[in-house]
């Protein structure tokens, strides 16, 4: 029996004031449970939120050691540099990844700004400068996004390539939609009190929230 868990948008940094990730112990337990129950893990982009790996390893060594073996990484606009590590033994990084009739991707490719990596990097760095002065700037950016655009564009992306299903992240809005015959799933995020993931078990996909943390979902 194939068992898979999909997460995205942890935005792990270095435990500085700019680090939005505050779920270290919960994610460690999540990884331990994933291994204990025989699941594989897919991280669909923006696992990390800075360009330097060493500060992340120094701050989150225990968490990184708890990741299941053969975890598959999809890089996002915040951690596109991960693709440079693809040569390391046991480290598998992709822009997109196909599993039968399902395609996995981060989702910044459906964002008019973020699909331009140079422009995306500019706004990421600008956000890092402004965030100490305006702590809610990330929330405001997300609220301005129009989830329906990502839903329709991701469905089109999958259908044009012959896939029946697409799983992506980026928007931080977990949900499930059926668009023009394509099943669309969003993995949500692990910041701002949310602990979203998608789970595949017994041939079906489910949207989950780890623990008892309340999570607002966009579902149909």
Image (cartoon, rainbow, N blue to C red):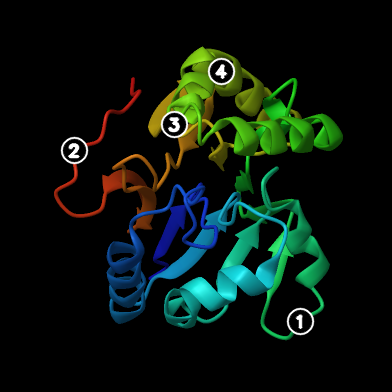
- Label 1 or label 4, whichever lies nearer to me, is 1
Q: Which residue is at 75% across, 23% downward?
A: 113
Q: Which residue is at 56% across, 18% downward?
A: 180
Identify residue for label 3.
Answer: 135
Identify residue for label 2.
Answer: 214
Q: Secondary structure at mark 4?
A: loop
Identify residue for label 1.
Answer: 88
Image x and y of residue 93, in percent: 71, 64
Left or right of 68: which side holds 109? right
Closer to us: 212 or 36? 212
CA separation in Å, label 3 and label 4: 39 Å
Q: Looking at the image, tell me whether mark 1 or mark 4 is earlier in sequence order.
A: 1
CA separation in Å, label 3 and label 1: 36 Å
CA separation in Å, label 2 and label 1: 37 Å
Tell me if residue 203 can be seen: no
Q: Looking at the image, tell me whether mark 3 or mark 1 is earlier in sequence order.
A: 1
Q: Looking at the image, tell me whether mark 2 or mark 1 is earlier in sequence order.
A: 1
Q: Which residue is at 35% across, 54% downward?
A: 22
Quarter holding the N terminus is: bottom left
Closer to us: 105 or 63? 63
Q: Tell me the number on the disc at residue 180.
A: 4
Q: Secondary structure at mark 2?
A: loop
């Amino acid at each position: 029996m194939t068992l898979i868990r999909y997460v995205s948008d942890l935005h792990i940094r270095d435990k500085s004031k700019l680090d939005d990730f505050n779920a270290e112990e919960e994610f460690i337990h999540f990884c331990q449970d994933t291994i204990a129950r025989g699941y594989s893990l897919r991280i669909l982009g923006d696992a990390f939120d800075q360009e330097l790996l060493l500060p992340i390893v120094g701050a989150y060594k225990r968490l990184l050691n708890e990741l299941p073996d053969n975890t598959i990484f999809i890089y996002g606009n915040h951690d596109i540099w991960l693709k440079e590590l693809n040569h390391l033994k046991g480290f598998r990084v992709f822009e997109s990844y196909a599993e039968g009739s399902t395609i996995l991707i981060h989702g910044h490719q459906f964002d008019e700004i973020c699909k331009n990596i140079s422009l995306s990097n500019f706004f990421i760095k600008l956000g890092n400068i402004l965030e100490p002065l305006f702590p809610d700037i990330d929330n405001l950016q997300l609220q301005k996004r129009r989830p329906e655009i990502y839903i329709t564009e991701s469905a089109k992306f999958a259908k044009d390539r012959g896939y029946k299903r697409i799983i992506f992240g980026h928007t931080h809005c977990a949900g499930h939609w059926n668009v023009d015959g394509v099943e669309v799933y969003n993995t949500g995020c692990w910041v701002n009190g949310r602990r979203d993931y998608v789970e595949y078990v017994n041939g079906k996909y489910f949207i989950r929230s780890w623990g008892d943390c309340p999570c607002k979902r966009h579902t149909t």
